[in-house]
Amino acid sequence: MQASEIKFFSRKEKNRIEKIIEKNYCAKLDLSNVILAKTSNEKVWVLSKEVGKLDISKLKVINVGLYLGRLKANEKILLSIEGCQLVGRQARRNIAILNETEAEKFIQGQDVEVEKSVDCKERNFVLVKYKEDFLGAGKFVNNKVENLVSKSRRLLLCE
């Protein structure tokens, strides 16, 4: 994230993100001890409060913080892989659980069949889980998950 593109969230905006996550995933995420920032392309980043003490205007910032996800217009957030792992520990809704075969397909970037779903709403973003691991996010459609993990984050498995 470039320094010139950063917009820091106010407490009110942080509360809005917490409410979006709670509404979509039934997970209480406490963001009071971190700084949230947004880039011009609606990507939300989590930063340590220590970053707020730095004068970054004189630095060439290439990347800072943890990428949480991208805000969407309909009061939803498409979580990154790390965002899924952060939220997933507490999530109680919109979780698609995969078997081993489907999990392998998912990490390669394919759309997959869901073995079990936990309160998944049709056409909503879901956390994709295999055993105890959260693999990323997708869109739940007709008991399938459309893979929304960016191509650069997918794995190519060789046999």
Image (cartoon, grey):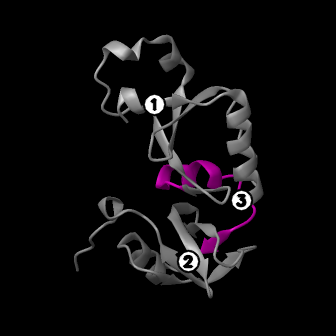
Q: Nearer the viewer, mark 3 or mark 2?
A: 3
- Please name whichever residue, 121 or 33, is drawn nearer the observer in this view of the structure: 121
Quadrant where the N terminus is found in the figure: top left
Q: CA distance from mark 3 to mark 2?
A: 18 Å
Q: Where 88 sits versus 109, above or below?
A: above
Q: Residues within 10 Å of mark 3 (few under 14, many from 20)?
A: many
Horizontally, is 115 left or right of 149 in the view? right
Q: Which mark is residue 140?
A: none
Disc 2 versus disc 1: nearer the observer: 1
Percent x, y of residue 144: 56, 84
Magenta range: 79-98
Residue corresponding to mark 2: 98
CA–CA distance between discs 3 and 1?
A: 27 Å
- Residue 67 on image: x %, y %: 47, 43
Q: Position of residue 139 (x, y in %)?
A: 56, 73
For mark 1, what is the residue?
Answer: 6
Q: Nearer the viewer, residue 23 or 7?
A: 7
Task: Check the image and report above or below for 135 versus 2.
Answer: below
- Tell me what residue is drawn at x 54 percent, y 50 percent: 83
Residue 61 lies, in percent from the top left, at 32, 26
* Residue corresponding to mark 3: 25
**Mark sitting earlier along the chain (3/2):** 3
Label 1 sits on a secondary structure element that is loop
Q: Which amino acid type is shown beneath numbered disc 1?
A: Ile
Asked if disc 3 and disc 1 are in contact, CB closer than 8 Å, the reply is: no
Q: Residue at x 61, y 67 (%)?
A: 125
